[in-house]
Amino acid sequence: EAGVAQSPRYKIIEKRQSVAFWCNPISGHATLYWYQQILGQGPKLLIQFQNNGVVDDSQLPKDRFSAERLKGVDSTLKIQPAKLEDSAVYLCASRISGGWNTGELFFGEGSRLTVL
Amino acid sequence: EDKVVQSPLSLVVHEGDTVTLNCSYEVTNFRSLLWYKQEKKAPTFLFMLTSSGIEKKSGRLSSILDKKELFSILNITATQTGDSAVYLCAVGLYAGGTSYGKLTFGQGTILTVHP
């Protein structure tokens, strides 16, 4: 079974530039998450999709971050303009829909962003 | 605000030692507690706990949940250098009227096992 795919794996940009990350979840997984993991910290949820609808984006800095999942499969996370504090690994995760009895998340390898 | 706190933040041991990692939580609408292992890549799933007092085991790793005292421990016996990683605790929350839920992570415990 193919895992969660993310690209690019690494990106270096200057502050005020824009960047986009792409995620393809495991086939059949209706729920998709974007997490931000700053070095030395645990992952922080940015946004959660159920199919193509947003379930939770309460911690997404909406003045600069946006995300979409147009057809309920792939998702894109965009940052514009980037700030130094956005340097982090952006993890995409997915899980089968339903209750938490099937609750484990499957993570992608992450996209490491460095903002100079 | 939902909080998940792990301790210690870092731990250095020698091969063969036994370690205990702690995770305490203060959240609304608790559904489950999950442990993940993170090496230099994506977190990988270890355990999901939903009931108090029932130990889950996988090889040298085991975990238990106490829903009254709001904590969980992860034990690793006979540690090996391959156990060196960040161990993340996460709490699954029931999200208002749906089963979608969300996962709130602690800051992680960095475990280093020396030969």
Image (cartoon, coloured by chain):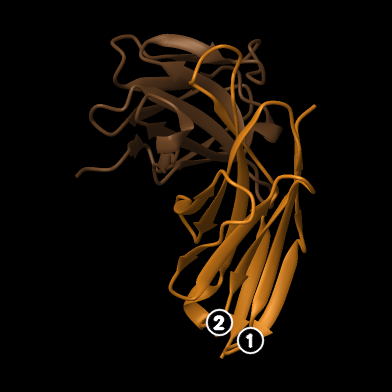
Chain colours: A brown, B orange
Which chain is disc 1 placed on? Answer: B
Res B17 label: 1
Q: Is residue A35 above or below residue B109?
A: above
Which numbered disc, 1 or 2, marks the residue that appears first in the sequence?
Answer: 1
> Which residue sits furthest left?
A1
Q: For this view, does A103 lie left or right of residue B72?
A: left
- Residues at discs 1 and 2 in contact (Cβ within 8 Å): yes
* Quarter the C terminus of chain A occupies: top right
Label 2 element class: loop
Q: Is residue A35 above or below residue B81?
A: above
Distance of label 1 from label 2 (alpha carbons): 5 Å
Indicate the quadrant containing the N terminus of chain A: top left, top right, bottom left or bottom right.
Answer: top left
Q: Residue at x 55, y 85 (%)?
A: B78
**Percent of width and height locating residue B62:** 54, 67
Can the viewer see residue B39 in this picture? yes
Q: Which of A23 and B29 lies nearest the eye of the viewer? A: B29
- Decide if residue A18 is in sight here: no
x then y, percent, for residue B68 = 77, 45
Q: Is residue B29 left or right of residue B61?
A: right
Q: Report helix, strand or loop for mark 1.
A: loop
Q: Chain of mark 2?
A: B
x and y percent of residue B66 in the render? 70, 51
Residue occupied by mark 2? B79
- Please tell me which residue lies in front, B23 or B62: B62
Give how far across and how far down residue B32 sits, in percent: 58, 39
In front of the other: A7 or A104: A104
Left or right, A98 with respect to A85, comes to left
Number of residues whose C-alpha sits closer than 10 Å to that of mark 1, classed few (under 14), some (14–19) or many (20 or more): few
Same-chain check, marks 1 and 2: yes
| Amino acid at circle 2 | Thr
Q: Amino acid at mark 1?
A: Asp
